[in-house]
Amino acid sequence: MSSKQIAVRCFMMTVFLAVLSCASPKKIVYLQNASANAGKNSNSYELLIQPDDMLQIIVSAENPEVAVPYNLKSAPVEGAMGGQSQGDVYLVDKNGEIDFPQIGKIKLSDLSCAAAKEKIIGLLKEHITNPTIQLKITNFKISLLGEVSSPGVHKVQGERITLLEALSLSGDLTIYGKRKNIMVIREKNGEKTIEKVDITKADFISSPYYYLAQNDVVYVEPNKTKINNSVIGSDIRTTLSVLSFAIGIILIFTK
C-alpha cells in the first residue's frame, strides 16, 4: 500500500469519526409536522393555587378606611422573591387555606386566581359595599437543569408560562439535549409526578405539561453523543490529533 493510499485512508477515518458526532435534523427540530389546529385547546389553561403559594391580596373599597381592617399591615416578608419587601402577602398553608383578616380561614387551593378573587369578594360583600381586590401569586418559579445553556431557577411574571418559553429563558437546549425525552417534575397535593415530553412533536402542545405549574422542575437529559464524548471524548480527540499529524507527515515525505 502506497503512502498516499495510507494518507487517504487516514483522512477517510477522520471524516468518519467526525460524522459520528453529527445529529439528525429529526432529533433537533421542534414541533415537526405542526398544523394550524395544533394545541387549539391549550388556551383554556389556568394556573391553580397550591399549598406554599404566596398570594399578594389587596382589598379596596369606595371608602378606603372601611377596607383597612381587611388588609394585612404592609411589612417586609422574609424570603420574598428577588429580595424585595412585599406587604399584604399570604402563605397558602398545607390545607390550601389562608388566614384572612376579620374573616378567618379561606380555602383557595385548586382555584384559579380569578376564581379566588370572586370567592373573597363574595365573603367581603357581607362587610363592605362594592369591594374590589387585587390578587396575584408572588413566588411563581420554575427550575431548569441538565442540557440547557443557562441552568437555574427563574421567576415567572404573569400567571402562565409554556415549556418552550421556559427553555428560552435558559438560553434553549444545547445541541446535546434530548428533545424527545424532556422530564417535567411536578408536585401536586404533596405527590410528585414525572412526565416525559417530546418537543419534536407538535401534539405536545395539547399535553397538560405544555404549560408549567409553580415549582416545576424541567430536566433535559444528555443524548448519546454527549455521554459518549464524556466517556471517550478525550480518546477521540487524541486519536484525531495523531491521525492529523500522521497525515501531515506522510504528505510531506511523499511530495
Image: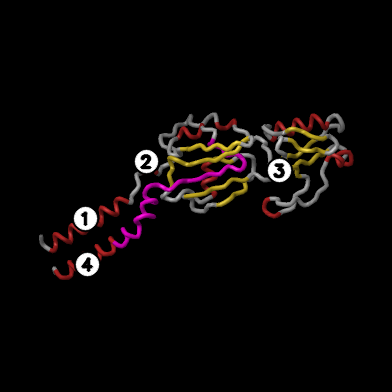
Residue that appears at 72% across and 54% down: 84
Q: Was residue 232 drawn as part of the magenta stretch in this picture?
A: yes
Residue on which the image places disc 1: 12
Q: Quadrant of residue 58?
A: top right
Residue on which the image places disc 4: 248
Mark closest to the chain's N terminus, 2 or 4: 2
Mark closest to the chain's N terminus, 3 or 4: 3
For residue 54, which numbered disc appears in the image?
Answer: 3
Q: How far apart, in angstroms, are the residues tagged by discs 1 and 3?
A: 61 Å
Q: How many numbered marks, from 0 up?
A: 4
Residue that appears at 62% across and 41% down: 214
Counting other residues with Cα less than 10 Å from the Cα at mark 2, is it few (<14), some (14-19), or many (20 or more)?
few
x and y, in percent, of residue 111 in the image: 68, 32
Residue on which the image places disc 2: 26
Residue that appears at 78% across and 45% down: 88
Q: Was residue 226 drawn as part of the magenta stretch in this picture?
A: yes
Span of residues in magenta: 209-238
Left or right of 39, for residue 57: right
Q: How far apart, in angstroms, are the residues tagged by discs 1 and 2?
A: 26 Å
Q: How far apart, in angstroms, are the residues tagged by discs 2 and 4?
A: 36 Å
Circles 1 and 2: CB atoms closer than 8 Å: no
- Element carrying mark 3: strand
**Colour mapping:** secondary structure
Q: Is residue 85 above or below residue 113?
A: below
